[in-house]
Amino acid sequence: MGRFLFASSCSLYGAAGSAAVAEDAELFPVTPYGEAKVMAERELSSLASDRFSPTYLRNATAYGVSPRLRLDIVVNNLTAVAMTTGEVRLESDGSPWRPLVHVEDICRAAQAALEAPRELVHDEAFNIGRAEDNVQIRDVAEMVRDTVPGSRVSFADGAGPDLRNYRVDFSKLADTFPGLKLRWSVPDGVSELAAAYARYAFTYADFSSSRYVRLRRIRELLSEGLLDDLLRRQSDAQFSAANVETQQESHG
């Protein structure tokens, strides 16, 4: 009883470098997001008891088609910009390592953790992904270029290395759940995304809008007075109306 899955992130490894890190590695978050995941895991662990059993799923960087598409994650972003501009544009020099995982495989791992005997997962962290999907950002760019006809890789002016640079060891996940099969490769995910963007006639105007980028949307809601400084709703009626409008735009 009291099972709780926390959607954590491999971003709490932050600047770990090119050696694959396991769940017991020292944490080096380099963003507020990563720092928040570290703090949340520690606070949840302090609550672990016979009545409350948390498990921490440290998801690799997600990608894949979903009803609430996000374009602030690398595979989704690079595929979208290639489909709408013909350029696979990198904001870094492409050298950083990043582990990647399809959203469907995150769901498979979550189901496995919920169905596992409590003693296997109680107050335990698991890196979610596959060893072969530890890739450098330039590798992702080349996968996109090879998938989107006529596209080419380009670099932003002054592009340099990204502080977020880490590879992840997924052996604990495989050893604990031998029947769990993560099915998606990154090239397959790029193909899925490209087909979806083509099917919905996704445009550069869509790519440039705020509705697919979480931080831009939060800033809009703050500027419109719909969120306060703690990101709490100012008015349920106003907030609901804004969300309805955004959903209509994203499906329209």
Image: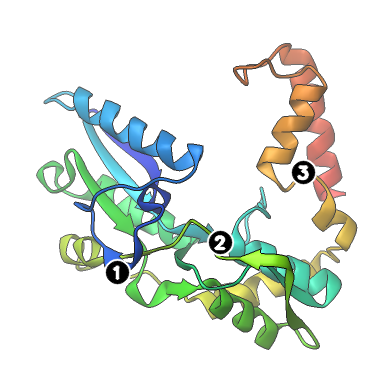
Q: Is residue 169 visible?
A: no
Quadrant (top left/top right/bottom left/bottom right) for the N terminus = top left
Q: Locate residue 166 relative to residue 77 in the image: left or right.
A: left
CA gap, disc 2 and disc 3: 17 Å
Task: Decide if residue 103 is on the left or right side of residue 78.
Answer: left
Residue 176 is situated, as x and y percent measured from the top left of the image, at: 17, 60
Q: Dot 3 lies on which element?
A: loop
Type of amino acid under label 2: Tyr
In percent of width and height, residue 82 lies at: 76, 73
Q: Nearer the viewer, mark 2 or mark 1?
A: 1
Mark sitting on residue 63? 2
The image position of residue 33, as x and y in percent, is 49, 39
Q: Are marks 2 and 1 in contact (CB under 8 Å)?
A: no
Q: Which residue is mark 3?
A: 211
- Dot placed on the residue nearer the N-terminal end, 2 or 1: 1
Q: Visible in this render: residue 29?
A: yes
Q: Nearer the viewer, residue 40 or 183?
A: 40
Q: CA distance from mark 2 to mark 1?
A: 23 Å
Q: Is residue 230 left or right of residue 27?
A: right
Q: Residues within 10 Å of mark 1 (few under 14, many from 20)?
A: few
Q: Badge 2: few (under 14), some or many (20 or more) residues near its Cα, within 10 Å?
A: many
Return the residue at label 1.
19
- Kind of residue sitting beneath label 3: Arg
The residue located at (69%, 83%) in the rendering is: 145
Mark 1: amino acid: Ala
Mark 2 or mark 3: whose residue is earlier in sequence: 2
Is tag 3's residue or tag 1's residue first in the polypeptide sequence? Answer: 1
Q: Please give the name of the residue rendered at 22% of the width and 67% of the height, measured from the top-left corner.
A: 171
**3 or 1: mark nearer the eye:** 1
Identify the residue shown where x is 67% and y is 41%.
214
User: Can you say whether 169 is above or below 42 in the image?
Assistant: below
